[in-house]
Image: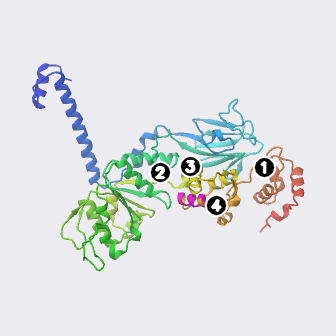
Amino acid sequence: MFRKRHQYRQYSRVFGTRSSGWIARKTLRNWLLQAALACYKDEAMSQEKTPALIRRDTSAEAVKSRRALALIVVFSNDAKIVGQVTTFMNQVTAGRKQEGDVQLAIDDRMLSRRHFTVRTTQQGAEIEDLGSTNGTYVGGRRITKEPISSGSVIRVGETLLAFEEVSSPLHKDAADELVGNALPMQLLRVDIERVAKTDLPALILGETGTGKELVARRLHELSGRSGEFVAVNCGAVPSQLAEATFFGHKRGAFTGATSDAPGHWLAAHEGTLFLDEIGELPMELQPKILRVLDSCEFLPVGGSAIVKSSARVVAATNVDLAARVAEGRFRQDLYARLAVYILRPPPLRERRSDIVALFELWLKRAAPAKSFALDAELVERMLLHPWPMNVRELRNLAQRLSLSDQATLTPAELPPEWATQDKPKSAPAPIGLKELPSREQLDALLQWHGGNVAAIATAIGKDRKQVYRWLKKYNLLPEGYRKDDE
């Protein structure tokens, strides 16, 4: 960088030293490093003052380059491959044995040697059954060849797979309560780690039961802040006491104020203040919250001295705040101040490969002394369920099923309301080559195919006469399952 000795001396005088040579170079290097850090800090401060949204695509650069399509084994009788992720660029073939072009070998007696193939196309991806005996099911339907999208659930024999876009797994801290390795969860972790160390306000937007408070707590854990994590449900704060609840009050400020109270904002000093259900915040309190966000100071109810608090604010809601702004039910300037950085925990239906792991976790927590096996049909029902209440609903189901006396949990253990859900929920379980089907299996097949024996025979790869013999053995009449033409 410097070719002449007098240039070293010149920079030595600038940096307050009379030495030259390597000392000047080292001093210059440190000065440049400090300047770069100062520029980075100035940029962060300018972002804090500008209530502009930071887009997800820039926060997910760490995982973007490692994305790939994959088949994830979610459940199988072949325990050694559960959780296995098979990535591919053009095509992947699954079968009973790893031979020829079979990359995914599944030791399941109901699979054919070459069972199905998933390949990429110009439009996306497609799945094709390779003439298997027991069929390939996607979303509960038996298929021959059709397009497939990320998030699809595939069933072959007693094995269930999720077709998803994945990335190289990130390092997961043991203290991280956010369970799951699906790509949406990895993107969420990247966003959390990116914003955690800053003082920027964060807004968590997500459906009911997606774990918004867990995200807020994780932000606090990674922030390194010395204060407490204080959670407030804005929808549960009485409007007449809202100001005192947030900013505290002095003794005698109102009837019942028998002593001083610090309020949530001061309690979260040097920590994190989590404003849950921010969409329910009373309109009259919103400008006061905005002022504290801007100035970091407030006046307790009945007080005369200004109080300062460096609490970092994280808000969450399951409502469309932008729509409420348009309706005049939420202040636009407060929304802009909170939405400096938006985090979106994904709904459970967008991370189906995590469902079984989450269910087993909650099942173990609910009944630590018990050990349960899962039936493949139950797992398929769970994977295809829409989960409108997300992880909270899954947790409730695990707690309910933990009361079962059965060693293997089956669909019979599901709540009654699951029985009234519309098709397609799950296809009838495949029938082995040599086994005699049970009455329940045949009953499910008759219901699924509307009493059409020819369709049942085709679906299970058996002769129609054989199917009739089974029906006669169990005294099942196909006519009773057929719907009258309207």
Report if the CB atoms under discs 1 and 4 are less than 8 Å apart.
no
- How crowded pointer 4 is (Cα within 10 Å; few <14, some 14-19, many 20+) is rated as few
How many angstroms separate mark 4 from mark 2 (CA)?
24 Å
How many angstroms separate mark 1 from mark 4 (CA)?
36 Å
Say which label, 3 or 2, has the lower sequence index.
2
Q: Amino acid at mark 1?
A: Ala
Q: Can you identify the residue that label 1 sits on?
A: 459
Residue at 42% x, 40% y is: 62
Q: Quadrant of residue 88?
A: top right
How many angstroms separate mark 4 from mark 3 (CA)?
23 Å
Q: Which mark is residue 354?
A: 3
Q: Is residue 382 visible?
A: yes
Q: Can you identify the residue that label 4 sits on?
A: 403
Q: Amino acid at mark 2?
A: Glu
Q: Is residue 333 visible?
A: no
Q: Can you identify the residue that label 2 sits on?
A: 177
Q: Report the magenta residues as a range.
A: 391-398
Q: Which mark is residue 214?
A: none
Q: Secondary structure at mark 2?
A: loop
Say which label, 1 or 2, has the lower sequence index.
2
Quarter of the rendering occupied by the N terminus = top left
Q: Amino acid at mark 3?
A: Asp
Say which label, 1 or 4, has the lower sequence index.
4
Residue at 54% x, 52% y is: 350
Say which label, 4 or 3, has the lower sequence index.
3
**Place of residue 290 in the rendered image (x, y in percent of width and height, measured from the top left):** 29, 64
Quarter of the rendering occupied by the C terminus = bottom right
Outermost residue toward the top in this view: 4
